[in-house]
Structure formats: C-alpha cells, structure tokens
C-alpha cells in the first residue's frame, strides 16, 4: 500500500481565501488541505503558507477578532465544538474578514 | 484607481438615498488589474447595526459568504465595499479605518444630505498589515458604458 503523509481521518477540503490574503497564499483563491477538524485545516493552511499566520492570528496565537470562519454556511464560533469541529470530505471553509464602520466618533479623514 | 459604469455609480448613490437617514452598505464585485479595480456589479447588503444605523454599519458575515460565492460563480472577485454617511462628509472616519480589514480593496463613501446623495469618494485601504494599514485617496473613473467582465472574455 502506498504510504501517505495523512492522518487516517483527514479529509480533503477547500479553504476559500479572501481577496486581501491571496498574496500570502501563492495568489490562490482556494487552497485544498487534508484535515480532520477546522483547527487542523487552519494549521495545515498556515504551515503551507506561513505568511498567512500573522494576518489571521494575534501575536499570542488567538484568531484575530475580525476574522470570521464559516464551515460551509455555519459560523464556526457558534458550532458546539468550534475549531475542534470535525470536517468531512467536500466541506469548505470560508475566511471572511468583517466589514463595518460608520461616521460615529469622527476625528479625521480627507476629502 | 476604481472604475465603474454610470449605472453602478448611480446604484450606489441611490441606495444611500433610499436608506437615509440610515447608512447603507454593499459590496463591489469586479476584476483586479494591477492597481485598477474594475467594478462590474454592485451588491446591496443589509446593515445589521439596528442599534445605531444612522452612524454605523455592519454587513453580516454570512451575507458576505453568500456574496463571495456569487462572485466566484460569476468569475469575479470582491474588489471593494461601499457605504453612506448621512448628513456627513464623504470622508473616512476613524471608525471606518479601525474596522476596515480588506487591505488592497476600495472603500467607497457617499455623503447623503437631507436624503440627497452629494459627493462620492473612494479610498483604497493600503498597507500590508493591521498595524500599518491606512486609507489613500483613490480616483473614481465613471464610464458611460458598462465595464466589461474581462474574466469571461
């Protein structure tokens, strides 16, 4: 049997990369990884593309607050097992930085 | 530079008038060619900041997931976002900068005075990281004709 560098439960899944982070992922809009959980998928992603790490995580290793993760159509924050949620073949993970703002507390800007 | 058709430009401004006195928000889909972002489609989004919609906006991430899928299927990319400033100048605020995270994308702001869209400006979120990101003024080139979707040609 051919040897594979994969854990037995690792499944191929696609991670969609948002426009601003593609430059740190070899300009790809999606990366396929073999992973068993959401956290494992992110770990595989950042080990393959280490420059992504500082854009996704703070210096103390926490996912940046503005980075949203969606497993298929589910917000990972609201899944019972969060990043320990198991993934299955064909799942996809979307990395979506938040979009917000507004005129409250104005103190700068240019025309 | 940001390029878009008169149709899409008008759609952004009209959205701000329709939601006045609340802020509107949406996504710009198109193509990226060097430093030029060409908008071929604008997508209206809901403002989830029901607690303070007159001076804050937020797009639900689930809606962004849907828009990103829509873009992918159309061979387009998310190249920017837009929102309105009711009764306030079309310039970015500290809140806009603090909550902007799509580096390399355009952030279009329309001032809406007493329900009428006035000035529309665009700012590119420049820099490399959260720590050195900043807005730069960006020219908006409005074309009479629709911007071609180069990815499908």
Image (tube, rainbow, N blue to C red):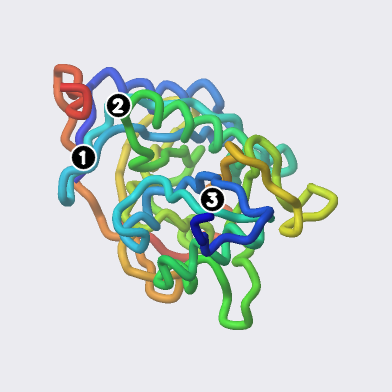
Q: Are marks 2 and 1 in contact (CB under 8 Å)?
A: yes
Where disc 3 sits, the SS reads strand
Horizontal relation, residue B65 to residue B82: left or right: right
Q: Residue at x 48, y 70 (%)?
A: A47
Query: Which quadrant: the C terminus of chain B?
Result: top left
**x and y percent of residue B27 in the render?**
43, 35
Horizontal relation, residue B7 to residue A89: left or right: left
Residue that label 3 marks? A95
**Which of the chains bears the disc numbered 2?**
B
Sequence-wise, which precedes: disc 2 or disc 1?
A: 2
Q: Do marks 2 and 3 both belong to one polypeptide chain?
A: no
State the CA–CA distance, disc 3 to disc 1. Answer: 28 Å
The residue furthest right is A80
Residue that label 2 marks? B9
**Which of the chains bears the disc numbered 1?**
B
Q: Residues within 10 Å of mark 2 (few under 14, many from 20)?
A: some
Query: In this orientation, does residue A101 appear?
Result: no
Between residue A5 and residue A58, name the one nearer to us: A5
Tell me how many marks there are.
3
Q: Quadrant of residue A13?
A: top right
State the CA–CA distance, disc 2 to disc 3. Answer: 28 Å
Between residue A60 and residue A3, name the one nearer to us: A3
State the CA–CA distance, disc 2 to disc 1. Answer: 10 Å
Where disc 2 sits, the SS reads helix
Judged by depth in the image, the label closer to the viewer, 2 or 3, is: 3
Q: Which mark is residue B140?
A: 1
Q: Residues within 10 Å of mark 3 (few under 14, many from 20)?
A: many
The residue furthest front is A1
Between residue A60 and residue A109, name the one nearer to us: A60
Q: Residue at x 22, y 35 (%)?
A: B38
**x and y percent of residue B83 in the render?**
46, 39
**x and y percent of residue A44 in the render?**
53, 64
């Amino acid at each position: 049997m051919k040897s594979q560098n994969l854990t037995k439960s690792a499944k191929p899944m696609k991670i969609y990369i948002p426009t601003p982070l593609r430059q740190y992922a070899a300009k790809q809009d999606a990366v396929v990884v073999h992973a068993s959980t959401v956290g494992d998928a992110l770990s595989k992603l950042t080990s393959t593309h280490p420059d992504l790490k500082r854009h996704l995580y703070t210096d103390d290793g926490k996912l940046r607050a503005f980075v949203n993760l969606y497993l298929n159509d589910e917000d990972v924050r609201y899944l019972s097992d969060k990043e320990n949620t198991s993934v299955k073949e064909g799942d996809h993970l979307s990395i979506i930085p938040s979009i917000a703002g507004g005129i409250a507390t104005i103190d700068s800007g240019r025309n | 530079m940001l390029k878009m058709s008169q149709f899409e430009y008008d759609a952004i401004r009209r959205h701000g008038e329709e939601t006045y006195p609340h802020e509107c928000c949406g996504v710009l889909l198109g193509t990226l060619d060097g430093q030029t972002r060409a908008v071929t489609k604008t997508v209206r989004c809901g403002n989830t900041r029901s607690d303070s919609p007159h001076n804050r906006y937020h797009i639900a991430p689930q809606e962004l997931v849907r828009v990103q899928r829509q873009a992918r299927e159309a061979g387009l990319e998310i190249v920017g976002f837009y929102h309105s400033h009711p009764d306030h100048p079309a310039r970015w605020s500290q809140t806009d900068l603090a909550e902007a995270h799509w580096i390399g994308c355009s952030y279009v702001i329309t001032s809406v005075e007493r329900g009428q869209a006035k000035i529309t400006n665009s700012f590119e979120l420049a820099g490399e990281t959260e720590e050195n990101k900043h807005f730069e003024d960006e020219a908006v080139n409005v074309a009479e004709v629709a911007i071609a979707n180069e990815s499908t040609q």
